[in-house]
Image (tube, rainbow, N blue to C red):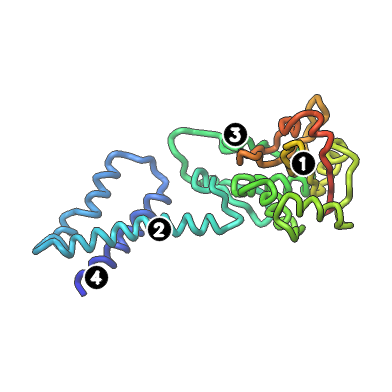
Amino acid sequence: MQEIGAVMFGVIIGWYVYYINRYRSGDVQFSDLTTFIGVIGGAGVTQLFGSGDKTLFAAYGIGLCVGFFGYALILCILVWRSKDFPLEYFLDGRRTMPSGEFAIPPDFRQGKIAFDAAKLTKRPVMSGCSPDAARIISICNNWIQNSLDGAAFVVSVGKSLGSNFNGGSLDDIIAELEQDPTWARLGGPLAAKRAADEGQFVIGALEQNKANSTFGQIVIVVSGPCAEDMLPRAYWINANKSCCTNENIGFIGSKAQLEKFKYFSKKI
């Protein structure tokens, strides 16, 4: 019974130590280490658990470890399962607001090395977009780093916009885009850009051609200026799992490949 009590006491202290360290507002100092050592092994603790065969102190140490790392593990699981908290939450506290836009709490504590969180993932500041177009960009930013491939990315964004896809593969999505009357076929990249500027959900897709080893690709076209080649900007995930955030789609491949893209739009 004494060992169980020591473990529970350690769990409470470990949980609280992690909580205080995560949400404190001051800078990290060397004195923090001495304070931490005093908490886990100070005179009061050793007087309680440090006598005899050290069994109680060992039980306390186990509980301390479980509480400290248990807090971190539960936090990771909650963020992983949430669609409103991306992995960047651990960097700067960003989360998706009810409006669908990203927000970084002004009081969130960051490290001494300053950085522009938007530049880390090449997320541009949205200006001049319609509300729907800005919302689509924010949702893309939310899902681009948390999706396994391009098809999963499009499915996740579509679900957030209230447009569900029955299939999960690239071929399934293209087939549904072509057959679903709520999706309009667009004439080309400029038409896709105009639809995205209007705040429509716009998808560009390239079917896989196994005969000539052409990889399939699917992108979400977003509002923004065209480059000199008159190609719109989009979000997509490459075959090597690298993410392209609000980039010119000319980076996808050759001109011949881009001419084979099909574009579809849907009002949200």
What crowding class fits label 4: few (fewer than 14 Cα within 10 Å), some (14-19), or many (20 or more)? some
Residue placed under numbered mark 3 in the picture: 119
Distance of label 2 from label 4 (alpha carbons): 19 Å
Residue in view at x 83 percent, y 37 percent:
260
Residue type marked 2? Tyr
Residue placed under numbered mark 4 in the picture: 5
Residue in view at x 70 percent, y 56 percent:
168
Using the image, tell me which numbered label, if any, was put on residue 209: 1
Report whether residue 99 is seen.
yes
Residue type marked 3? Lys
N-terminal of the pair, mark 4 or mark 3, is 4
Q: Secondary structure at mark 2?
A: helix
Residue in view at x 78 percent, y 40 percent:
223
- Where residue 172 appears, as percent x and y from the top left, is 76, 54
Q: Nearer the viewer, mark 1 or mark 2?
A: 1
**For the residues bearing labels 4 and 3, Cβ distance under 8 angstroms:** no
N-terminal of the pair, mark 3 or mark 1, is 3
Q: Nearer the viewer, residue 35 or 142?
A: 142
Distance of label 3 from label 1 (alpha carbons): 35 Å
